[in-house]
Image (spheres, rainbow, N blue to C red):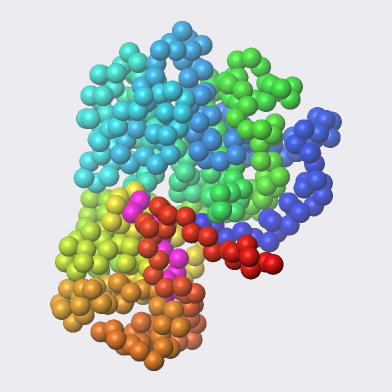
Amino acid sequence: MKLNATSEMIPITWPEFAHIHPFAPREQLKGYELLDQQLCAWLSQATGYAGISLQPNAGSQGEYAGLLVIKAWHASRGEGHRDICLIPESAHGTNPASAQMVGMKVVVTKCDASGNVDLDDLRAKCEAHSANLAAVMITYPSTYGVFETRVTELCALVHQHGGRVYVDGANMNALVGLAAPGQFGGDVSHLNLHKTFCIPHGGGGPGVGPVCVVDDLVPFLPAHRSAGMGTDAQVGAVSAAPLGNAAVLPISWMYIRMMGAQGLKAATEVAILNANYVAARLADHYDIHFSGGSDKLKGGGVAHECILDLRPLKDSSGVSAEDVAKRLIDFGFHAPTLSFPVAGTLMVEPTESESQAELDRFCDAMIAIREEIRAVEQGRLPQDDNPLKNAPHTAASLLGSDWTHAYSREQAAYPVASLKLNKYWSPVGRVDNVHGDRNLFCSCLPVDAWR
């Protein structure tokens, strides 16, 4: 995700921020309330929405809160029966789960060959469910790495049938300073502060997923009534603490304050540029899925991420996307997202944090891997014994007296020359992911070893 500056992280260690109890008396929370107000005002400017709640503790919780707001709005108009939620194939993976959680019925809509929402299919399903349509959930730009070219038309279509438009803000890092969901037709969005606005992400958090809404939905935003906040019209608390995961908010406050409007826009532009740079460098070696309708990016492009389609290579060589992911460890890379949103692919999202040198290092690794796959395709390496099938290679395996593989130790360890100067050694060899997911293994010492 993003790199986090030390200056952003230091304030969360100050006792004035770190040692406040979430349920301290309101008069002791004036500083946090001011931080909340300022951060909401900045996020409103970035998104084009009228009101924001910072209470949700994750993007998924923000989705849940946003859909509750939509349900409450429909109920306030005597239309609580509206429970159909249209979700395109390209939407973020948590969207269907969130809709189910609030009691909505999910209807999936199709995408066209370029990754855009199929408006003809969406129109047909809007008409079929017009009386009960509650919302549509889209991700913009989509998880396919596509800017929906007809997004305003899509929003207008759903509004015509009485539904509200939920724009998943998971990829807001490709929009800040360039486009605002609240201005192109969105009614509700959540933001991932742990992605777009620099709160660290990993290990389950800590995250914040603010829910943002247009003017007529503001009265329904979540509030912690047991802490003396909000009105009966609001949907109620969605997290245990009245101000949500407030202890990490100084990170986003610092990031936005230091970047300023121009800096935030520049970050967005570089994030999109980085993704297109990777796609352009790799287009002659891999199929770029959903690249603006062009196989080689001629006249097309991607948004903030590009999808490398490895399925044809599995057919021609037997090498899978998982094999490529494991081989990247030998090059010193944690693999990009594997088999999501499309099975058998790698989704590369560099953000603006990576330098061109690092992008080139990744591209060089992927090109070298493509050459190894080509050697398998041409029969110069066997399908069942090649650097990809046996990756990652540990130092112990390479230094052993027995080496029976069809390729050299040097190719296993140093597939590109730069690794001889800067090499990461994997501590373990190939792990069977599926077996590990389905079976519990304890790596701790047995109890009798502590006697």
Left or right of residue 375, residue 14 in this image: right
Residue 108, by quadrant, is top left
Question: Magenta part of the protein: which range?
Answer: 328-340
Q: Position of residue 259 (x, y in %)?
A: 62, 53
Residue plotted at (49% across, 74% down): 427
Residue plotted at (59% across, 66% down): 445
Is residue 378 among what the camera can see? yes
Residue plotted at (59% across, 45% down): 207
Residue plotted at (21% across, 73% down): 383
Left or right of residue 422, residue 44 in this image: right
Residue 209, by quadrant, is top right
Is residue 280 among what the camera can see? no
Q: Quadrant of the C terminus?
A: bottom right
Q: In the image as oriented, which residue stretches furthest toward the top?
A: 78
Judging depth in this view, the residue of 165 and 96 nearest the camera is: 96
The question of residue 339 being in magenta is answered with yes
Judging depth in this view, the residue of 89 and 142 nearest the camera is: 89
Q: Position of residue 208 (x, y in %)?
A: 60, 42
- Compared to residue 355, the image places residue 39 above or below, namely above
Q: Position of residue 148 (x, y in %)?
A: 33, 41
Principal SS element in the magenta part? loop
